[in-house]
Image (cartoon, rainbow, N blue to C red):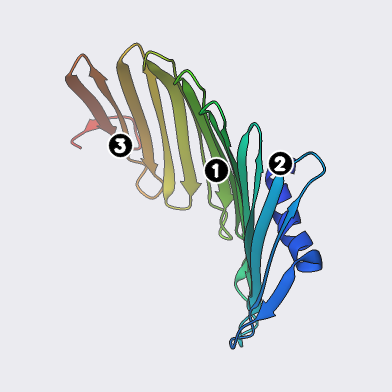
Amino acid sequence: MNISRKSSLALAIVTALFAFGVQTADAAGRVRVSGKKQTASGETVSGHAVAGTTAAGQAGVRGGATVTGANGTTHYSGGAVAGANGVAARAGSTTVGSDGSINHQGKSGWKGANGGSGSGSNSFVRNADGSASSSHQNSGQTAAGGSYSSNGAYARDASGNVAGSSQTSANGVKGSYNSSTNSANGATTHATNATNATTGNSYSGQTTYSNGQVTHSGTCKNAAGDVIQC
């Protein structure tokens, strides 16, 4: 599981809190810690974290920190869990600028005890003029050999016009699925292709939205390539 440098700062802050913060423990055995300080540059840093272990041996830690300065506020958060079924972790940061801009970055990952694994990332930016952009990427593999992936990116200008695209695919012993979505100039088109691995039957279709109208077309075929009823 790879965590980007900026997002991993959240987990680093959680670790630092346990080293320097004020610690307490509750009846369930969870350790809680919090702290606050002023940096030499005038920023205010505060944070909290909690960690614990269950009777079944599952362990987890989560926490967050907030950094406030003259140019805005950044909140970091992160967490991780581990147990008999696998491990998972996430980290992220969101900055709200003094000019009203927003910048969010996030990462996550997991790995199962049976061999499956996955990871993901997402981002969102809103500029002071109202324009914005977002992106995401996720992928994973199952223990049985299946796989999936999804990614996309969209942008909106200051006038509200949206453009971008996304793709999704999945493959396994039962078949495959692929789709894509594209948006530009007020129109959005979604295309899908799917195949049944057992029968060989397939479907291919497309749906378009433009100027308040929706159109759709689709075709089903058998393993020999002959058109059949959907």
Query: Do the residues under discs 2 and 1 have CB atoms within 8 angstroms?
Result: no
In the rendered view, would you say 223 is above or below 32?
A: above
Where residue 104 sits in the image (x, y, percent)? 56, 38
Q: Which x, y percent locates residue 181?
A: 39, 27
- Residue type (three-letter) at the residue carrying disc 3: Asn
Q: CA distance from mark 1 to mark 3?
A: 31 Å
Q: In the drawing, what numbered circle is on residue 215? A: none
Q: What is the C-alpha distance between the residues marked 2 and 1?
A: 18 Å
Residue drawn 54% across the image and 25% down it: 99
Which amino acid, mark 1?
Answer: Asn
Q: Which residue is mark 1?
A: 138
> Disc 1 on helix, strand or loop?
strand
| Secondary structure at numbered mark 3 | loop
Inspect this view and state whether residue 113 appears: no
Q: Is 195 rendered above or below residue 207?
A: below
Mark 3 and 2 residues: CB-CB less than 8 Å, in contact? no
Q: Earlier in the sequence, mark 2 or mark 1?
A: 2
Residue 6 numbered mark, or none:
2
Mark 3 crowd level (few <14, some 14–19, many ≥20, 10 Å Cα) = some
User: Residue tagged by mark 3?
Assistant: 222
Q: Residue at x 34, y 11 (%)?
A: 185
Res 58 quadrant in image: bottom right
- Which mark lies nearer to you, 2 or 1? 2
133 or 212, which lies in front? 133
Q: Residues within 10 Å of mark 2 (few under 14, many from 20)?
A: some
- Count neighbours of disc 1 (C-alpha within 10 A) and say few if under 14, some if 14 to 19, many if 20 or more: some
Q: Give coordinates of residue 21: x percent, y percent.
A: 75, 66
Instruction: Give the x, y percent position of residue 62.
Output: 62, 64
Q: Observer-nearest residue: 102 or 197?
A: 102
64 to the left or right of 14:
left
